[in-house]
Amino acid sequence: MNSTNSNTNNHSASTAPAVLRGLASRGYSITGQRRCLVEFIVSHSRHFTAEDLLNDLRDEGVKVGRATVFRTLDLLERTGYVGRVRDGERMAYTACGMEGHHHHLVCSSCGQVLHLEGCPVAGMLEEIQSRTGYRIQHHSLEVAGVCPSCQR
Ligand SMILES: [Zn+2]
Ligand SMILES: [Zn+2]
Ligand SMILES: [Zn+2]
């Protein structure tokens, strides 16, 4: 279980230069379009779908092809800079500033996403593991609610 997140706070958002540096250090080339998309994606504090992203890009007059958007989302998800969250029935993406294993708290009213430090169920999983003899490989936990500003 990964618990290397202890120094990050719950509200950290990724910054585009940090993501681009991270991608470059893993050997991914930074094209103009990729840079533009990364900047666009990390500026979303709320969750978004690929369609939302395409609509926003069109509204802003940014010309990026559909395939490039899907490829970039895929790359960012594989490298951990983008995570998936569920909003009711639909799956959405969120930009992740926090590296490594973590969980999300989603506002079901405005779509804001908080990235929760550490794993609240780590102890429980260890207990299950020793009780059942399973070697647990992955788990998911998603928490949804209404954020303070939507409660007002
Ligand atoms: Zn996250
Ligand atoms: Zn909200
Ligand atoms: Zn966990």
Image (spheres, rainbow, N blue to C red):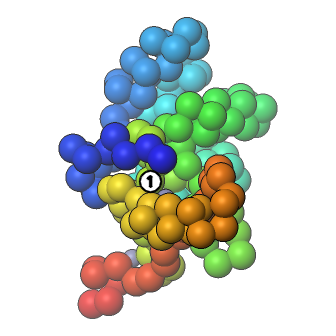
- Left or right of residue 1, residue 92 in this image: right
Q: Residues within 10 Å of mark 1 (few under 14, many from 20)?
A: many
* Residue for point 66% across, 67% down: 132
Q: Position of residue 60 (x, y in %)?
A: 53, 43
Q: Is residue 92 above or below residue 20?
A: below
Query: Quick one: 4 or 99, which is closer to the camera?
Result: 4
Residue 42 in view (yes/no): no
Q: Is residue 105 above or below residue 147?
A: above
Q: Residue furthest bottom?
A: 152
Could you tell me which secondary element the residue under label 1 belongs to?
loop
Amino acid at pointer 1: His
Q: Position of residue 151 (x, y in %)?
A: 32, 89
Q: Residue furthest right?
A: 67
* Residue for point 28% across, 57% down: 10
Query: Quick one: 126 or 105, which is closer to the camera?
Result: 126
Residue holding disc 1: 102
Query: Quick one: 7 or 94, which is closer to the camera?
Result: 7
- Left or right of residue 85, residue 69 in this image: right
Work out which quarter of the rendered image holds the C terminus and state it: bottom left
Q: Quadrant of residue 139?
A: bottom right
* Residue for point 28% across, 81% down: 148
Q: Position of residue 54 (x, y in %)?
A: 66, 46
* Residue for point 21% across, 44% down: 7
Q: Is residue 84 above or below residue 97?
A: below
- How many numbered badges does the structure rendering display? 1
- Left or right of residue 129, residue 150 in this image: left
Residue 25 in view (yes/no): yes
Q: Position of residue 128 (x, y in %)?
A: 57, 68
Q: Determine whether the beta carbon of the residue marked 1 sits less than 8 angstroms from the nearest atom of ligand 1.
A: yes
